[in-house]
Image (spheres, rainbow, N blue to C red):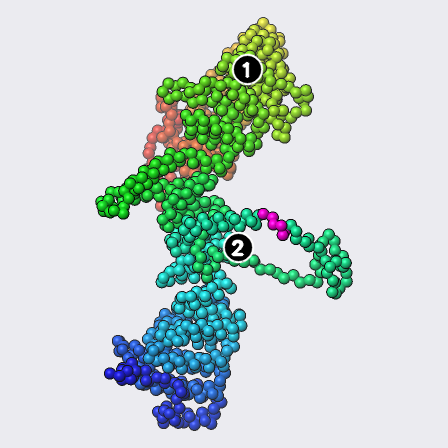
Amino acid sequence: MAVEDSPLASLSSRFPLTFPIPTPVTHSHLISASDLATEEDLLQNPDNLRSWLSYIHQLKDRISRLEPPQGDTSSPEESLLGPLSTHVAREGLQQLTLVYERALSIFPTSFKLWRSYINMRQSYVLGELTNEAKTARQQQSKRGSSFKTNVRELLDAAELANEWKDGLDGIIGYEEWRSLIATGERMIACLSHLPVPWLLHLSILLHPKCPSAFKRTYARRTFDRALRTLPPSLHGRVWGLYLRWAELMGGEAGERVWRRYLKVDPSLTERHIAYLLDASPPRPLAASKYLLSLARRAAKNLYSSLEGKSPYQLFVDFLELVERYADEVGMDEEQTLELKAAKQVAEEQIAKPTEESDSAPVEEPASINGRLMRIAGPPVPVEQGKIFKPKDAITVKKGPEDLPYDEDIDPANTRLLDVEGIVEKDGLEVYKDQAGRLWTGLATYWIKRGEFERATTTFERGLAAVVTIRDFTQIFDAYAEFSETMISTLMDALADEDNIEDEEFDLEETEKELDERMKSFEELMDRRPFIVNEVLLRRNPNEVVEWEKRVALYGDDDEKVVETYVKALDTINPRKATGPLYPLYVNFAKFYEEGGSKDLETGESKSEPDLKQARKILERATKVPFKSVDELAEVWCEWAEMELRNENYDEAIRMMQRATTIPRDPKKINFYDESVSPQTRLFKSLKLWSFYSDLEESIGSVESTKAVYDKIMELKIANAQVIVNYAGFLEENKYFEESFKVYERGIELFHPSVAFEIWNIYLSKFVKRYGGKKLERARDLFEQALENCPPKFCKPIYLLYAKLEEEHGLAKRSMGIYDRACTTVQDSDKFDMFTIYIAKATANFGLPATRPIYERALENLPDKQTAEMCKRFARMERKLGEIDRARAIYAHASQFCDPRIESGFWEEWNQFEVDTGSEDTFREMLRIKRAVQAAFNTETSFIAAQTAAAAKGAEKPTDTAQTIAKDAADPMAAMEREMSGTGTAASKKIGGPAFVASTLKTQNAHGIDQSQDEEQTANPDAIEMDEDEF
């Protein structure tokens, strides 16, 4: 069968339908008899656009009515021809084209007419839009002006809004496609200043069935023409379609389009990176260069990620991309080393000064008499080579400077990346707090490339560079996992029988490599504590504790221990040391003193003790500018102790004499002045003098010890403990009077709060020594102690004074002392003092003598303690048979006792009235109770009552509100209710008469008697009376 007779040829022969433009001459069916009236009207009024649009609308309605319904399944012809598969559609296209072309000949610049025409032509050629595309275009039409300039949203919209169903095949209907595109060219020629005609025409080129002749070169040139024709403010609308076309086309042309746009607006770089990685095949090299460029720009605040990523997150994304495509993106080890060597050579050449730069002429400022000629303007004097800016000069604002050109960020350059150099320069130097992740990523890159030795070197470099435990843990865990994986892989290879039978498999080499890997892995595990210590010392080389830990790690290796001590003492800055520095010197000296480490088997030192070297170390320590004087004092004390351990007692004394040497003018030296060196202030160190005094007490004489203590007193650095120690030392050696003088000197030195403690010891010692032999002197001492003693501290002295008078003096004087104490001590101690005073008065003079003391106590004590004292006073009066006086005391104390808080007081008074009172006195007690409760019935008192009740675990006042109301209505009934369940054991034993039960009945709101439900129990505190007494 010939080609002309094939079905495809017969289908292609139907096109083009619209070129040349159909006319009634060539196509007689285009104008029907029903359209003649409209045609005559248009001939008479051709300038009426509304008539033309009405005619077009009439034709569209007729064509849609004549169009046959579509079936569920499309035939091959329908799938190839799309909407033009029916004869009615083809004739309708020709009719509408004729009318549109006639109208456009009259209105060639009508945007409304052109848009309707192009949409009609596209509906027949491109097919019908999908439902999603229709929805997207409807939503776009509702968006504001900001949407039309947002390229990112326009790009997403172009992807959604340009999807069609069916459509005319680009091969069969090539001529019709060509005619449609030619019509679009005519439209943009007439309306080139408007963006919508360009967008309508360019959207045709995104159709999947668009012929290849128009899909690439023609489309790219048309997009470029649109950008050249339209103003820059409208370029965003074109770029949305242009970038979508670039993604559909792909290849080098699409990549060039994207690079052109990203130079102007890099905000869509992340989207383009995702596109490059999802493309088939992916382009990881270009994507990694784009990502590296973003990370560098973001680090300099030249780029802000639309996804909210930080510069570090962008760099980590780059690192992950490099790890994923290690072979396609990065250089191998050999290329990396060559590039690094070339960069090093270039840097050295730049650093060296060249002869040309030395011999270059020095630039001179412009001047009137200089080499430059003044063209215009008055002469301007030049001062110190400065050129001044005129007042009317215009300052041009500079935008942010872009990054200099670099092959590593040029996507058009095909050179592979120096990943190691990039990670070191852009990662480790910038993000120092994330060193662990960066070193691990770099090592992973080398592992993916199969460069295992380079990966091991990278891990080691990372462990030697990090300064935090977190980064160390990341690198060490990855290093250990890599080593374990390599070992397991080699063991599997050796266990595989196929490898053993393979001639190319080198068994010996594999076993050797396995042994080396296992050995290095064991060494790595053994080195872990040392590496951790190195990390901490890199973070803070002045950390004394970490240096001591490092010494402990070496254990029995004496050479390493000495090396570590020497390195530590050379490294640490004494003024910046973290923690006390002196233990490092002391332990180093002890190391030599003990002869190094000890043998585990014998427990003896491996070397002979070297006291000479130990003294040299301590001598060096005494010249170190420590942060505090106490550290220097500790060094001297440790030196003296070392001499004592080696029985060099005289040498120890000489050390302390040397350390405590007093300068010529000690008063000018301020011990707390940090600007003065510790060595200058050392002579005022109490710690040093205390050690010296203890040393003299142990191995010195009494006179030498007294001399040391006297120097401490002269320097005015003694504290209370030193005074007590000095006096105790003298007392042990039978110098009692001198010890008492030391106490008196100490009392003069200190504040009364401290002197009080010395007085206590002094007076106790004096009384113990002399008792009543020197009574007058003792009394004088006590009076001196009490003269300036604050009330807070004078209680013990008064008690000791009174005890002295009781044992060795007169009882009357002791009572006078107690009387003074009761008014002198602080308020919190007065109650105890009155209690002691009363007890002593009772023992010496009997109960009646305590009445004036009680009365004074009631005048001086606070309210809360007054109530307690009143109860004791009342009990005393009751013992003496003074019932009325006791009742009056209870009545006086009642004003301080809230019934809701001090229930114990009222119970005691109640029991007192039951035992000794009458009905009248009992009623008076109840009346006073109600009056007191009413007086305390304030908000503050109520809150205090609730708090006290909660603390005691008792029932709160709010829980007894109803009972209180009943008490106010009927006191006698309330009394019986209270006593029915809370009778005391004493009342039950007495079994006295009870009051007559109340006849009042309590009724509720419904009139029901509630008293029947209450438990009827006898009142244990009620007073029984006969009827005759009423």
Q: Position of residue 508 (x, y in %)?
A: 29, 40
Question: What residue is shown with label 1?
Answer: 652
Mark 2, secondary structure of its residue: loop
- Residue 536 pos. (x, y %): 46, 36
**What residue is at 45 percent from the left and 87 percent from the top?**
103
Tell me which residue sits at (58%, 9%) in the image. Answer: 702
Viewer-proximal residue, 337 or 550? Answer: 337
Give, as a three-letter code, the residue at label 2.
Asn
Magenta extent: 352-357
The one of 600 and 46 positioned closer to us in this rendering: 600
What residue is drawn where x is 56% and y is 49%? 349
Q: Does dot 1 land on a helix, a strand or a loop? A: helix
Q: Which quadrant holds residue 494?
A: top left
What residue sits right under mark 2 in the picture? 301
Examine the rendered structure and indicate whether residue 847 appears above or below residue 115: above
Whether the residues at callouts 1 and 2 have beta carbons within 8 Å, the answer is no
Q: Quadrant of the N terminus?
A: bottom left
Query: In the rendered structure, which amino acid carries the disc numbered 1?
Result: Ala
In the image, residue 695 lies at what x, y percent? 54, 14
Tell which of 941 and 299 is nearer to you. 299
Q: Reading the chain from its start, which is encountered first: label 1 or label 2?
A: 2
Residue 415 image position (x, y, % from top left):
44, 57
Q: Residue at x 60, y 23 (%)?
A: 682
Q: Tell me: residue 106, above or below residue 963.
A: below
The one nearer the camera, 250 or 199, is 250
Q: Inspect the magenta stretch and tell me whether residue 851 lies in it.
A: no
